[in-house]
Amino acid sequence: MTPDRDDDALAAEYVMGLLDAEARARVERRIATDAGFARAVETWQSRFAEFDQTAEDVAPAPDLWPRIESSLAKETPRVTPTMQAPAVGLLGRLWRSLAALRIATMGSALAAVLLAIVAVMALQHAQQVAARKPIYVAILIDDATRQAGAVVNAFADGRVEMIPLVDMNVPDGRALQVWTLWNREIGPRSVGLLSRATAIQLDLEKLPGTTADQLFEITLEPAGGSPTGRPTGPILYKGTTARTL
């Protein structure tokens, strides 16, 4: 393992609280003097920040450490400082390799979690964008002047809106009525009535879903709407739907 890999593993173990008091003190002294190592510690702290913020503190039982020390005293022979084996050789390299493997595994798991979160967020964003983007659009035009007077947007969730592009003149006692025609045998159906040109959610809930080449038109009718249930006044603007890209 290279020194950089040793430092990365040590930084991770420090952040995760795996070091004993003496090793932790050495690391903290090094953080104060080694800028590169301090950055490695900060990197691991940022990686585990979300876990730190969501984890609940759990206080250990008061007799936990005395029981652990008692158990170790019974099972582990005490070794004096003069007989400590140096942390080199096959065993030392193996331990550092296992530590690096443990850190790499945790890093891979964390990366997988982050990737899943990013994927979910991307999917939610795509769904939000799709919900805002119409799947069909109709530009309603005045046949005489070829001027666009309104736009109709039909969305995937069934919503259909009409947005005026001009200020339409509505005489007293008259109203603007919006119609749609998807089947000539059935004829046009009223989907909106307005006293003035304004954006409106059209009422197509009881009609089949909007399709390509579906006609929308605005006529000038009596204030309460057409008395026959069919267009009776002049057609102000009309157009058919087209699929958006």
Image: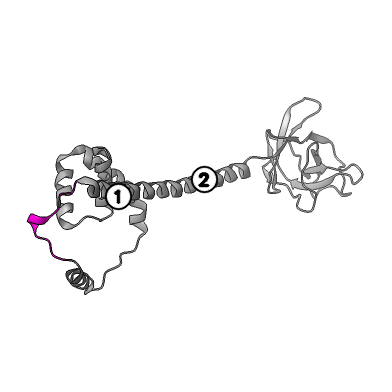
Q: Quadrant of residue 217?
A: top right
Is disc 1 in contact with disc 2, using a CB cutoff of under 8 Å? no
Alpha carbon distance from label 1 to label 2: 30 Å
Image position of 38 (left or right of 56): left
Check if residue 84 falls in the magenta segment: yes
The secondary structure type at the circle numbered 1 is helix
Q: Nearer the viewer, residue 188 or 234?
A: 188
First in sequence: mark 1 or mark 2? 1
Q: Amino acid at mark 2?
A: Ala
Q: Which residues are magenta?
A: 77-88
Q: Position of residue 86 (x, y in %)?
A: 15, 49
The secondary structure type at the circle numbered 2 is helix
The circle drawn on residue 99 is 1
Q: How is the image coloured?
A: one colour
Q: Position of residue 172 (x, y in %)?
A: 76, 43
Q: Nearer the viewer, residue 65 or 153?
A: 65
Q: Magenta region, mostly helix, strand or loop?
A: loop
Image position of 50 (left or right of 131): left
Q: Residue furthest left?
A: 82
Q: Is residue 79 positioned above or below 224 on the image?
A: below
Q: Residue furthest top?
A: 145
Identify the image quadrant of the C terminus. Answer: top right
Q: Nearer the viewer, residue 240 or 143?
A: 240
Q: Quadrant of residue 144?
A: top right
Q: Amino acid at mark 1?
A: Ala
Check if residue 105 falls in the magenta segment: no
Q: Nearer the viewer, residue 224 or 163?
A: 163
Report the label total: 2
Say which residue label 2 marks. 119
